[in-house]
Every structure is written in structure tokens, then in C-alpha cells.
Amino acid sequence: MGSDGGYQELFTRAEQGDHQALGELFEQHRDRLRRMVQLRMHGRLQGRLDPSDVLQEAYLEFSRSLKDYLRNPEVPFFLWLRFITGRKLQALHRHHLGTKIRDAGREISLHQGALPQASSQSLAAQLLGHFTSPSEAAARAELQLRVQEALNSLEPLDRELLALRHYEQLTNAEAAQVLEISEAAASSRFVRALKRLKKILEDSAQ
């Protein structure tokens, strides 16, 4: 997102109380934020909450906090929005599920509580997409299990890079900033993780 200079007019209008500008700023990123929520929402919440509920909570926080962010924008605008949204999702997790919802064998987040963890099961399902033919259901279930096992064999940082880059569709620069590593390291680790994941799946299919 760079310096976020392309948002300057909307930022100015929003600071002046223009609700349309606030809405436009948020709407530009709604799809990316929804993807993050879908990936990181706990399975037990998916029947109770819709990602739109989380985004509505995030929008209210965004509209209250934008002026404070603009006074000292330490991170790119989208990453700030993503953090707010993740924090709201985390609060909803605690409200509905309590604090004992961690499963160390399935966690892939390195955010130290800033965002809910994305499980290897959730990431595997998103990586595979959706089969529409009932005859493919069994094959999909078997493949998903193999993908989960392959993800679990990767280093946590590499799994998180796959989640950020492949599913959340963050840029390399954004993923590097989220994980607090260099862009060069993020790029090389992402390519390595993709190659390793592919090899594991090829070997398991033999």
C-alpha cells in the first residue's frame, strides 16, 4: 500500500465527518478483510456468526479510531484495518468460546494474540477450494487430510506466509511487515514453502 497517498482525499473528507468517505475507505478493503475473517474464524463460531457481523463491528471501531490513526500512521492503512478486524474477531472468539480455545497442534498464527489463529484444517480447505460434484467429496476429504498433514510439517513461519500470501492475498511487502521480517526473507520463504508443500503432496500421492 506504500504511503497510502491515493487515499488522501478520502482521508481528508473522512476527518471532516464525511460518512460517505468513511464507507468508501472501508468498502475498498471489505473483500480482503472478509477473506481474513473466513480463514481465522473458529469452526465452532461459523454456525453462529457471519463474517459480515465481524466486519460491521470492525467498521464501527474504524470510524471511531480513524482520526487517531491519521495522526500517527505507523503502518499502511490496510494493515491497520486488518489488525482492527482481527482484534474484533478475537473478542468475539472470547465472548462465544471463552479463553480456552487454543489448539497448539493446529495454530499457524505468529501474531501473539493479535489475531485469532488459522488452523491447518481451515487453510487446507481454503487452498483446495470447493468441489461441486458429490462424487468428488471422498477424494476431496482425502486430499484435504494430506494437505493438512503437509501444512503441519512446515515451519510455523512458512505456514503463516502461505496463509497471508496465498489466501489473504497480502503482497510480499505487507506479509513481511505483518511478520516483522525482511521482504527478501518473506519472498524466499514463501517460494520455499510452496515447493515443499508441492513435494510433500506429490510424495504422499505415490
Image (spheres, rainbow, N blue to C red):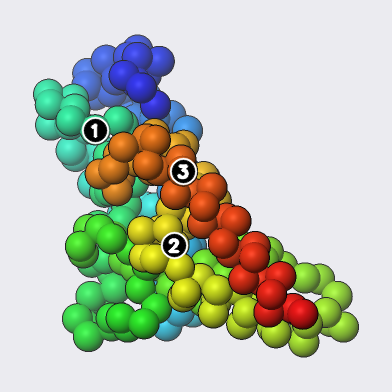
Q: Residues within 10 Å of mark 3 (few under 14, many from 20)?
A: few
Q: Which mark is residue 75?
A: 1
Q: Which mark is residue 159?
A: 2
Horizontal placement of 75 versus 149: left or right? left
Q: Please name the residue that numbered disc 3 is placed on.
A: 188
From mark 1 to mark 3, how far is it between C-alphas? 23 Å
Report the front residue among 192 and 44.
192
- For marks 1 and 3, the one nearer the N-term is 1
From mark 2 to mark 1, how far is it between C-alphas? 23 Å
Horizontal placement of 90 versus 68: left or right? right
| Image location (x, y in percent) of residue 185 | 37, 42
Mark 3 and mark 1 in contact (Cβ < 8 Å)? Answer: no
Residue at the spot 19% in from the left edge and 81% down from the top edge: 99
Q: Residues within 10 Å of mark 2 (few under 14, many from 20)?
A: many
| Image location (x, y in percent) of residue 101 | 28, 83
User: Depth-wise, is mark 1 or mark 3 nearer the camera?
Assistant: 3
Residue at the spot 66% in from the left edge and 71% down from the top edge: 201
Horizontal placement of 83 versus 175: left or right? left
